[in-house]
C-alpha cells in the first residue's frame, strides 16, 4: 500500500530503483514493482537503454562493414565511424526521448514503469533498422 503526502504522487520513502530493475508485472510475488517518478531518473534509464541498443546495432553494422571492406586501407576507420555515429545518435535520441516521455508522464502525474524506457529504445532502434534499407528510406 502506498501512502502519498505530496501533491505530485511520489510515495513517502521512494528510492530510485537500480538499473535495469525490470520485473514481470503479471502474477509476480517475488519481485517488487519498480517505478520511476523523477524526470532525471526517466532520462537516465532512457539514455542507458538507447546507448545499449545503439551500441549493439552500430558495432554489429561496423564489424560487418569493416569485414566486407577489409582489403581496403580504411576498414578500421569504417568501424570507428560507425561506432562514433552510433554513440552520438544514442546520446541525442536518448536525451530527447527521455526528457519527452518524462515530461509527458510528469504532466499527467503518472508513475512510469521501468519497462517504458526499454520499449522506447527498442522502437527507436527498429526505426533505424527500417531506415537502413535504401528503398524504404527514400520513400519515407
Image: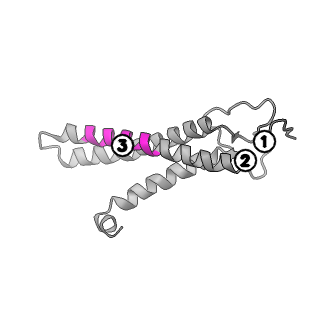
| Residue located 26% across and 37% down the image | 80
Looking at the image, is mark 2 or mark 1 earlier in the sequence?
A: 1
Asked if 1 appears above or below 12 in the picture, the reply is below
- Between 78 and 67, the one lying in front of the other is 78
For label 3, the SS is helix
Seen as rendered, the residue at the extreme bottom is 139
What segment carries the magenta color? 79-93
Give the CA distance from mark 3 to mark 2: 33 Å
- Kindly check if marks 2 and 1 are in contact, taking CB atoms under 8 A apart as contact: yes
Residue 22 on the magenta segment: no
Residue hosting label 1 = 9
What residue lies at 43% left-to-right and 58% top-to-bottom? Answer: 127
Q: Nearer the viewer, mark 3 or mark 1?
A: 1
Of residues 25 and 113, the one nearer the viewer is 113
The residue under the point 76% across, 41% down is 8
Tag 3 near tag 1, CB within 8 Å: no
Residue 109 bears which disc, if any?
2
Quadrant holding the C terminus: bottom left
- Of tags 3 and 2, which is closer to the observer? 2
Which numbered disc covers residue 86? 3
Residue 27 image label? none
Is 67 left, or right, of 85 in this rendering?
Answer: left
- Horizontal side of 49 relative to 12 (left or right) equals left
Mark 3 or mark 2, earlier in chain: 3
- Mark 3 neighbour class, 10 Å CA radius: few under 14, some 14 to 19, many 20 or more: many
Picture colour scheme: one colour
Amino acid at each position: 500500500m502506498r501512502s502519498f503526502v505530496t501533491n505530485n504522487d511520489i510515495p513517502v520513502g521512494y528510492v530510485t530503483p537500480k538499473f535495469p530493475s525490470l520485473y514481470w508485472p503479471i502474477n509476480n510475488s517475488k519481485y517488487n514493482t519498480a517505478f520511476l517518478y523523477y524526470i532525471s531518473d526517466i532520462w537516465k534509464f532512457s539514455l542507458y537503454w538507447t546507448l545499449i541498443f545503439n551500441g549493439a546495432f552500430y558495432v554489429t553494422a561496423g564489424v560487418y562493414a569493416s569485414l566486407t571492406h577489409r582489403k581496403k586501407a580504411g576498414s578500421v576507420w569504417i568501424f570507428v565511424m560507425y561506432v562514433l555515429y552510433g554513440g552520438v545518435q544514442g546520446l541525442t535520441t536518448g536525451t530527447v526521448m527521455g526528457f519527452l516521455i518524462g515530461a509527458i508522464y510528469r504532466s499527467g502525474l503518472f508513475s512510469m514503469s521501468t519497462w517504458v524506457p526499454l520499449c522506447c529504445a527498442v522502437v527507436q532502434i527498429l526505426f533505424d533498422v527500417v531506415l537502413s534499407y535504401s528503398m524504404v528510406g527514400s520513400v519515407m
